Image (cartoon, rainbow, N blue to C red):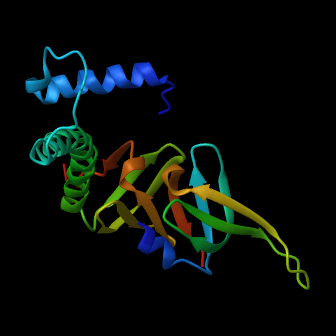
Amino acid sequence: MIEELQGLIGKQVQLASALETISGVLVSVDAAAVTLRTSEVYGYENGSYAIVQIRFIAYVRNLS
Amino acid sequence: MKIIVNERELKEYMEGLARIVYPAFAGKETFTAVPAEQDQDELRRIIREELKAAFGAIDRGTSGDLQRMQQTLDRHSGKVTELMTPAGTVEGAIESVGGDHVRLRETGGTSVLVPLSQVVSFQLSGKQVER
């Protein structure tokens, strides 16, 4: 699963957990969590990020 | 897990544990001497075996369930299925089944990764037959 998720880094994905569904660009994946950039303002470095524990991911849809 | 004990309780606990895993100490009030190197090795071996048996059973329970789910989904590879997850239903053809996940190809061409541990249930369409 982690290897599959790492293959999605940089792509637009939709990530669903039991509580919510988040869309954004997959930024990083480690053993325990994934980080999604959920917004980006051109010309600014900071956006909004969502960090989700892998064990709570119900599914990941590749939107790219 | 966090256990709060004082020094006396800890000592009693260790002595009780030693009596269980090493009956030669049974009946003695306290440890008066450090067990011989050979006894220590034996104790370590027994404790390792106990831990391995205890945690191995837990691991087998979890991975065994996933393995069964993997085998079941693998049998239906290529077929269109509806997977029920805690976040809702995902529908698509089973593209691949990995050790801990299944990849579906939806009708629009998008792919969806679903961890096997999150699959609550799944449905397959039956074959269409002529009447």
Left or right, B34 with respect to A30, comes to left
Residue B2 or B86: which is nearer the viewer?
B2
Task: Examine the rendering and report whether any part of residue B39 can be seen.
Answer: yes
Depth check: give the residue in front, B92 or B131.
B92
- The answer to whether residue A30 is left or right of residue B102 is right
| Residue B28, percent from left and from top | 17, 17
- Nearer the observer, A18 or B111: A18
Image quadrant holding the N terminus of chain A, namely bottom left
Q: Quadrant of the C terminus of chain A?
A: bottom right
Q: Residue at x 17, y 38 (%)?
A: B35
Q: Nearer the viewer, residue A12 or A36?
A: A36
Which residue is situated farthest in the right direction here?
A: A43
* Residue B128 can be seen, yes or no: no
Residue A56 x/y as whole percent: 53, 49
Q: Is residue B19 left or right of residue A24?
A: left
Q: Position of residue B57 (x, y in %)?
A: 20, 40
Q: Which residue occupies the extreme front position in the image?
A: B32
Above or below, B128 against B103 in this view is above
Above or below: residue B116 compared with residue A30: above
Q: Outermost residue, bottom direction?
A: A43
Whether A64 is drawn above or below B9: the answer is below
Count the marks. 0
Q: Position of residue B95 (x, y in %)?
A: 33, 71
